[in-house]
Structure formats: C-alpha cells, structure tokens
Amino acid sequence: MQLTLLCALVPLFPFIGFLVNGLGFRNIPNSAAGVISTASAVASFVVSVLLFSNFLSGGSQPFTAVLFDWVSVGGLKIQFSYLIDQLSLLMLMVVTGVGSLIHLYSMGYMHHDEGFGKFMAFLNLFMFSMLLLVMGSNYLIMFFGWEGVGLCSYLLIGFWNKNVSYGDAARKAFVMNRIGDLGFLIGIFLIINTFGSVEYQQVFPKAVELFKAGDSTVFWITFCLFIGAMGKSAQIPLYTWLPDAMAGPTPVSALIHAATMVTAGIYMVIRSNVLYTLAPDTLEIIAIVGLATALFAASIGLFQNDIKKVLAYSTVSQLGYMFLALGVMAYSSAMFHVMTHAFFKALLFLGAGSVIHAMGGEQDIRKMGGLQGHIKITFLTFLIGTIAISGIPPFAGFFSKDEILMHVYEHNKLLWALGVVGSMMTSFYMFRLLFLTFFGTFRGTKHQHEHLHESPLSMTVPLMVLAVLSVFGGALGLPEVFGFNHQLANFMSPLFEHSKTVNALVGAKSALPHSTEYALMFVSVMAVALSMTAAWVLFVKKANVPASDETLDGMTKVIYNKYYVDEIYQAAIVKPLYSLSEFCHSVAETAMDMLVESTGKLVNVAGNGFRQLQTGIVGYYVLAMVAGILLFAVFTLRSVLF
Amino acid sequence: MLSIILLSVSGIASLFLGFNKSRSLLMPATLLFLLVALAVNLWDWNVPFTLSSAYNNGMMTVDKTTIVFSAILLVSALLVIPFSQNYIDRPQAQPAEYYAILLFALVGGIMMTAYDNLIMLFVGVEILSISMYVLAGSDKRNLRSTEAALKYFLMGAFATGFLLFGVALLYGATMSFSIKGIADYTNANVGNLSPLLYVGIVMVLIGVLFKVSAAPFHFWTPDVYEGSPSLFTAFMSTVVKTAGFAALYRLLAVSFTGLYDYWAMSIAVVALLTLVVGNITASHQHSFKRMMAYSGISHAGYLLIAVTAFQNTSQDAILFYSLAYSVATIAAFGVLILVADKQQGSEDFSAFNGLAKNNPFLAFVMTLAMCSLAGIPLTGGFFGKFLIFSSAFAKGGLNWLLIGAILMSAVGIYYYFKVVIAMYIREGKTEKIALTGLQQAAFVLSILLTLLLGVVPNLFADLV
C-alpha cells in the first residue's frame, strides 16, 4: 500500500528528526542539528504535497490508512490509523508548510543559544504531535497528539528555564491546558459510551441516525469537547496562559502559540461538525464565548506595550473570531480564517522576532521607533502583515474576516455590530504597534542604535514567503459576490454532508442580496480605515508615546493590567484552593496518615512473620512442604473424599 | 522440533569448543546457536498443523502456541547470555560447561512446552531441573552457591517424586500416558472416574507448582535464587517459570478441561496465597536479589490467576505476561550483575545508591524494568496484568481473588520503587560502568520490547 506508506511518512520524518537531535544534542554540532530538523520538516511538507495531489487526482475520496491495531478492550477496538480527507490535508499543508518556514527561521534566530539542538528537537517533536492530532482517524489519536502538543508547548515556553518567571508561565500554560484536557477526555469517554467507537467514520453517521438536533446527550458531549477547545485555543475563561506563553522563544510563539497548536480547538470542532450541528445550544455558547473573547482580548491589546504581548492578545482575539464563525455554523469560513491567520500571524511574530533580534532583546515598543530605515525587509513584511490582519482589501485577512462577519450578520445583527467594533480595535492596536515601532524617532539607547541590523537570510526568507502568502492567501476563497467561485468552501463541502442532513443551513450559499453584502463590506472597511487613521493621528502626527506604567490611571490602568483577571483568578480560585489544601493537610492528612501507616505496619509485621518462616534449614522446609502438600491434597480432594 | 535436536548438538559442540585455550569464541558461538535455534523454531510458523504433524508417534506437537512459548524461552536465553562476560573472566570458571548446560536446559524447557505425553513432560522437567541444580552450584568456591545447589536438589528431588508418582497414578487410572488419551478417558467416563485419577491430578499439580515456586511449595526459592550466581538466577526465574507455566496450562487445558470444577478452586487459593506471601515478604528485604526472588514468587501468583480463569484469552495472557516478565526480570538482573561487580559483590538495595549520577543509562533500564514489574502503564507489565485480570473478570466469580491481587500489586509498587529511589535520590558513589556492545544491545532490546508491549500490546496479544 503505497498511499499508507506515504501517510505513515508524514509524521515519521519529524519524529526521526526529534530522535536524532534529542538523543544526540550534546554531540551533534549546531549547524548539523539545524539542517537535520529543518530537512525533516521540509520532507514532511513535500510528502504532504504529494498526498494532496494524489488526493485531487484520485477524485477526492477520503482514505483511511490503517497502520496497526492499537488497543482492543472488550467490544472496543481502536486502530492506529490516519484519515486523509479535505480537512486533514488543509491542516497538513498549514502545519508542515508554515512549520518548515519556522524551522528555517529558527536556524537563524536561535543560532547562538546553547540549547540549540534541544530546541530543534522539541520543535520536531511538536510537529510530530501536531501531525498526529490532525491526521488521526479517531478521537484517541487526536487526544494523543493533543497531549503531545501540550507537552511541547510546556517544554518550549519554559525553554529558558533559568528565568523563574518563564518557568511559572510554562506551568501556568500546562495547568490551564490540563483543565481543558479533562473536559476533552470526559467528552471522549461520553463518545465511547454513546457510540461504542471513537472512529470518526463510525461515530458521525451513527450520530445522525440516533439523535435529533437538541438532544441532551450530544449537548454534553459537544460541551465537554468544547471545554478542551477553550483550554487549547485560549478562550474565556481559560485564555490567560497564552499571553504569558510569550516567555518562550519567538519562533515558538509563531509556530505553536499563533499558527498551529492554538487552532487545534477549531480543527476539533470542524472535525466534529456533525455533533455540533446536532447541538444548537452548544453552538450558541461557542458563539458568545468566541465573541466575548474577541472583544475582551482586543481591548486589552489596545494598551499593551510589549511587542509580543500585543500580538498575543491579538491571537486570542482572532481565535475568538474563529469560534464566533463556528458558533454560527460557518465551519468552512472558520477554516479559511485559520489558514489566513496562520500566514499573517506567523509573519507578524517572526517580524517581531526580527525586530527583537535587531534591538538586542528589547521588547518594549516605547523604546523603539523609527526602525523603518534600518530594517527594511522586516518593516515591509510587517506592514503587509498589519494590513492583512486589519482586514483591508485585497489582503488575505479581509476575505476571511469579512466572510465570518457576513455569516454572523445573517445569524444575528447585534453580534455582527460587536464583531465590527472588535475589528476596529484590531486595526487600531495593530497600527499603533506598527507606528510606534517603525515610525518617528528612535527612543532606545545609543548602544542599541549602533547595534541595529537586518536579520540574516534564513530569517528574512521566511518573512518574505509568508508576506506573499498574506497578500495572496485570500485567493483561496474569493467570494461569489465578486463573481468568483469560492474554491475553499467547495473543496470542503463533502466534510459537511452529514451536517447538511441535520440542518440545511450548513454550507448553504448566503441568502443575502449582493447589495447587502457590498454594504457590509463597505461598513467594515470604513470602520477599519477610521481606526487606522486615528492611530496615525495619535502616534505619527502627534507622536504620542504611551506613558510609563506608574502614571496610568482610571480605566486605562485597569485595561493595561489586563482587567486584573490573573489577580481575580488568584483570589477566587487559587487562594481558596490553597486554604482547602491547607485544611486537608492539617486535618485529613493526619487521619489518612494513621490509616496508611497502620496498613504499612500490618504489612511490616506480616512480612516479618513470613520472613521468619524462612529459616534456611532444609529439614524445616521439607516439613513445611509436607504440611502444605497435605493441606493442598485435602482441600483439592474434599469433593471426592467427603 | 528441529530446534531440540539443534540445541542438543550445539550443546555438545560448545563442550568441544571448551578444549580451545581461547575462551573468547564461546559466547559468540552460543549466541549464534541460539539465534539459529530461534530461526528454526519460527520456521514452522506457517506449516499447517494437523495430527500427522505430531512428532515421534504422538510424543510432541508443534503448533503456534508451542512455537511462541519456545521463542520466549530462547529470547530469554539470548538476553541472559551477554551478561555472562563477568563469569567467563573468572580464573576458576568453566565457561564451556556453563554454556552447554544452559543449552541443554533449554532443550528441557522446550520439551515442557510441547509435550503430548506425560513421559516427555517428566523428561523435560528433569533435563531442565538437573541442569539448574548444577548451575546453581556453579560458583564452587562460594559456600552459599553450594548450599543453594544442595537445597534445590533435595527439595527438587522430593517434588519430582510427587510428579512421577502422580504420572504413575494417572496411568493406572486411564491406561494412557498421552495427554489426549487421558482427556478421552475422562470425557468417556464422566461421573464414574477412578479415585486414582483424582489423587494423580493432585500429585502432578504439586510437582509442577513446586517448579513454578507457588506457595506453599516455594520455600526453596529465596535461598536458591539468592545463593546462585545472579546470571543463573536470571535464567532460572524466567526460563524455568515460563516453561513451568506452559506445561501446567497445557496439561490442564488438554487433559482436564472437563474436571475444571475439581481443580480450579485449589489453584485459585494457591494463587492468592502465593501473591500474599510473595509480595508481603518481598517488601521486607534488604537484599535486592532476595527481593527479586520473592517478586518471582509473586509473579507466579499472577500467572496462576490466568490459569484459574481458564478462558479463551487466558493462554494469550500467560504468553504476554511471561514475555513482559522475563524481559523486565533479565534487564533488572543484568543491571544487578554489573552493579554488584563494582560494589564488592554487594547485592543489597544500598549498592544502588546514587547509581543514576554516573550511569544514567543503567538507572533508566532498571527503572523501566521495575515499572514493568510493578505494572505501571506504558510498559509491558501493565498490559500483562491487565490481560490476566480481564480474563479472570470475564470468568466471573473470582472477584475476591482479583481484589487480593490488586491490593498486592499496590504492595509491589512499594518495594520495586525502593531501588528506583536508591538510584535517583540517595547519595552514593558508583563509578562509570563500562558495558560491552552485546550488553548494550541486550538492554536496548529489553527497553524496546518493554515499551512496545506497553504501547502497542495488540502487536503481540493477537499473535496466537
């Protein structure tokens, strides 16, 4: 089976890269380690492209590659197999494509780090886990990858673990994700309990057969799965780990915490679209959580002064938009935004990395300014990324975001209005970031000024490739209103076959008249342009610089401090937990100790007794054995004798 | 069945190799013999098995089950041999004899897995046992080794008497030595069975339970395991046990299926007793090696649960468990041999103090082996226990035994982790221990097998 082999190769390449670099990182020279891991990522990309072309030429039939039987417990049989269909192929292209570029970039960015080999090994391990997550043909393999990417995220956030607060950030991400994972796991157990299988291709048809829309079983399944997505994709209330995750090296922020891992939750919902369509209540919750996250995070982003923090909140906010799209059953629009977002957010993060590299590690935008003349490539590509994320036509972000907003408008006009407000905030904080960093006069130290330099080619090439993708990525889904055929939506439509039988609205063409669509576009573009102009006036024309932390007051201070959410969590959840644990420690533990220790003592006494039976004298042993034999014989023969 | 002939011939050949002044040829030659025997053993895999494929007028049968059991024996031997390096180098050692006897012992073991006739069972048991008596005493100048050999021989002779007497009684009752013949007789005379048969079963069971060191016939085990050179203890606790369980299950499954109600309760009680004695006494030892002896007893208890369950899945469970247990036990003894060599022969837990510092690889191997023996997930031992427990659960009515077994596995975690704590947390000095290439290969193979069994159990569980 050639196709099965190809499928097996995709995750295998990064895994081999991980093994080589992971086992030999003390012995392999940095240059070789970088080449090995980047080559393995690229190899996996090439195989993915082959798979894709094979898929298209083969009539777009989904294909399951069974590698081996994994677990069989009673009636439940779980195979280790990959599912190749429209969704997994799209995710494959994003993960391996963007992943390869970021591997390449890391070769330049992390070059001087003493743990370089280890870093590249972790990146490979991440790729491997992420590929399992998107390729698996059942929920268990997805969960395997889900946990794997969580582990890598933990390892990479805390990569510079000599800094204590970075270690704390890693732990926070891990704990927040565990909360979500618990929900996800319960969801999987419910699926096993309800359907007797975890295989997508068995669960989904059965779901349509067994349940009607609105059934409570499906509600609980989808709700638990969504809790998992909240953790992994940083939605309210589990989002606070993502901004802290910026403690990791910048390529990590780009790959894991912007382009791929955090979209796992969206992937999972699209994958389970049948279940979600059957649970309109969950969808409503998702839409509200998504929108709330989008607005909340965007408003925090308005006042942040750390270049990576701004991007982090922007990521949280964009993820909110994707969930908003899922909530109104615009599954393919969410996927469209996942892809364009992967391009421009990876670009922005890598650009930010390049800026930090030039500034010698400085991340505070108040100490930058006027960089455009010094690092031209970075500036131009960052500009493209900013335009793309703000949703200005004809860049990629415009098409995907506008499509989401259009579907939201059809669903509920209030949600749409709030969505437009969110996108105004997006363009404001992004242009604020751009203007403060690249325009005006330089505000850093003299030493930094002399140090300013453009990054090496291995860093700028990924920037340029991603910039091109950010400009033209929208071509994947040019809308019908401009007279095009929406390619992505058409490509993905077989994924929603089952959903369509439940709710005809899924994947249906928009019922809005073209004039309304034009009007919606006009409104959102004008809104974006307005806030962009406001940013220009404030930060270029008037050359304002955000005040230092101490002089803040009122609402600004509240928002700058991220609405004190971390502090609220600390007071409302962590502190009570501590006191509960203190209580358990003092009262319950004493009781437990007595119980455990007395068991231990009992074992000890018994052990001592048995030990003394073992005297070492053969005569005694024979005697004991004869006694044993007599007992055994009498016990066995009891039915015959008596 | 060619493998029996091959092993016998190669055993004699390695005796001739001993005439050579250079001892360096012996180990590679033995490994080669074993590999050839393994290949020959697996060669029969795809041969269709019919009655006519029974060898030598119904003395032995080869089928997939016997092939897999034999393969486990051969793989265990392959893993043990690399650690004989330290023994070859001793001036008073007689390596040619050791290797020859090991090969002969395997012949006995394979006969025990494949016998069709009680005479063959007896011959197999005796070949294996007598080889073991000799190897237990192979460290001639060491008093404890000599003592171990003598004890083993005395007690073993006693048990052999029971086995032989039992076989004679079975013949008296059924007029047949063939295990199928006995089955035919018992099936034909249901309700009208001779008392001789019942007594015969009891005696044969006692003989075999002694060999697998089930309580209350286990008294020899700790002294013999501790006194024998570690290399042969590793061999004894894996090969003898696997062969013993293969023989026990074959006898019960072929001859006495119809009498299940008669023997099952006794085996269940013995299983529980074995578990309690093995685990509780193991938790109280200072010597790692003696702990491993009791741990060996306790694992016999788990395997007896599968025998009691007597389901379709039980045999697979025994196979799986034997493999996982053998691999982990040999890895643990391998580390012990290397460590004790550096610690003036000390085999206590304290000999492992601080091992992880200079020998992270050895510490890792030991940790994984302990996890597997304790039944921690992602290792083979976990799925071994799982398969055994689930087959007993499927049988039903054995919940009291299962609860006991689960409690006892909790005790197991305590004493298995004592060595892990010693290696990683306690302070101590062990210089870097050099491994030969073969020893490294054996460790790596054991790690791979343990993890493979633990992560993709179905690769092995569906084999037979």
Image (cartoon, coloured by chain):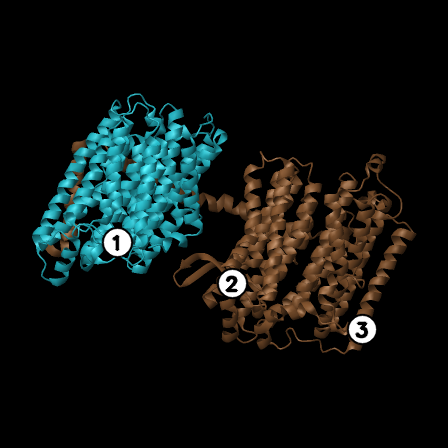
Q: For mark 1, name the chain.
A: B
Q: Secondary structure at mark 2?
A: strand
Q: Residue at x 34, y 36 (%)?
A: B31
Name which residue type carries label 2: Thr
Q: Please tell me the colour of chain B.
A: cyan
Name which residue type carries label 3: Tyr
Expressed as whole percent of the image width and height from the top left, the position of residue A439 reads 87, 48
Q: Judge the density around disc 3: few (<14), some (14-19), many (≥20) Cα neighbours within 10 Å.
A: few
Label 2 – label 3 distance at C-alpha: 42 Å
Pair 1/2: label in front:
2
User: On the same chain: label 3 and label 1?
Assistant: no
Can residue A376 be seen here?
Answer: yes
**Which residue was labeled with disc 2?**
A64
Kindly indicate which chain is depicted in brown in the rendered structure.
A
Circles 1 and 2 in contact, beta carbons < 8 Å: no
Q: Residue at x 54, y 56 (%)?
A: A6
Within the image, what quadrant is residue A416 found in?
A: bottom right
Left or right, B39 with respect to A540, comes to left
Name which residue type carries label 1: Thr
User: On the same chain: label 2 and label 3?
Assistant: yes
Left or right, A104 with respect to B45, comes to right
Expressed as whole percent of the image width and height from the top left, the position of residue B322 reads 32, 46
Q: Judge the density around disc 2: few (<14), some (14-19), many (≥20) Cα neighbours within 10 Å.
A: some
Q: Residue furthest top?
A: B91
**Which residue was labeled with disc 1?**
B308
**Which residue was labeled with disc 3?**
A518
In this picture, is A328 found above or below A513? above
Q: Residue at x 72, y 78 (%)?
A: A511
Q: For mark 2, name the chain.
A: A
Tell me the tag on residue B371: none
Circles 2 and 3 in contact, beta carbons < 8 Å: no
